[in-house]
Amino acid sequence: MGPFPALLPLRRAVRLLSIVALWVSGLGLLVMTGCVAWQVIGRYLLNDSPSWTEPFSLLLMSWFILLGAAVGVREGNHLGFEIGLHVAPPPLRRAMAVLTDLLVMLFGGAMAYYGWQLAMGTWSANMAGIALPQGLDYLPLVGGGALIALFSFEKLLAHLTSETVADVPLHGEHTVE
């Protein structure tokens, strides 16, 4: 049997949000690459280095790293201690997955909360080299943290409502679905 039917609208919405976050992340990487290229052209060919490219590139990098990390949380592509899950009996494996989801959800929530505090505390100052509020540097923590918390919440609900506990293949093993 598939996932708990009441979770399907949430799963669809979160899946769409994950796809959007991944595309925004990729677009940010492309724009950052263009900014760095302009920095190099300005410095070495025009002998007039633009001051805005470095802080703007760092801001974009923060966004695409944290959005990509959030998508990695949802897809389960992060490092983990999977050997423990592989050898654990199903009830313990479920408990470990639930605990992991809870901890990651709390971490994402804390990241969003404290990122917001940092953003608001530094909003009145300007970034060096660009006339934007310094608080913008911390908004990626808010967005990435909120997505990490949401994606972990989705996984937590899936683990709590699933009738079976999935096997965890060892590295190099593949399961047929």
Image (spheres, helix red, strand yellow):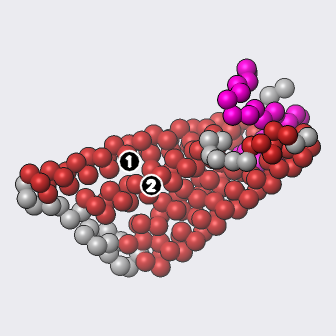
Q: Secondary structure at mark 1?
A: helix
Residue 177 against residue 31 in the figure, above or below: above
Quadrant where the N terminus sits is top right
Q: Residue at x 53, y 38 (%)?
A: 19
> Would you call the spot at circle 1 few (<14 residues within 10 Å), some (14-19), or many (20 or more)?
many
- Would you say residue 5 is visible in this rendering? no
Name the spot of residue 128 as percent of width and height, x first: 28, 73
Q: Residue at x 45, y 50 (%)?
A: 64
Mark 1 to mark 2 CA distance (whole Å) = 7 Å
Quadrant where the C terminus sits is top right
Circle count: 2
What amino acid is labelled 1 in the image?
Gly
Circle 1/circle 2 CB separation < 8 Å: yes
What secondary structure prevails in the magenta region? loop
Tell me if 119 is positioned left or right of 77 in this view.
left
Q: Residue furthest top?
A: 176
Span shown in magenta? 154-177
Residue 51 against residue 32 in the figure, above or below: below
Marked residue nearer the N-terminal end (1 or 2): 1
Tell me if 124 is positioned left or right of 11 in this view.
left
Q: Residue at x 35, y 71 (%)?
A: 133
Question: Label 2 belongs to which residue?
Answer: 63
* 155 within the magenta span: yes
What amino acid is labelled 2 in the image?
Trp
Question: Label 1 belongs to which residue?
Answer: 28
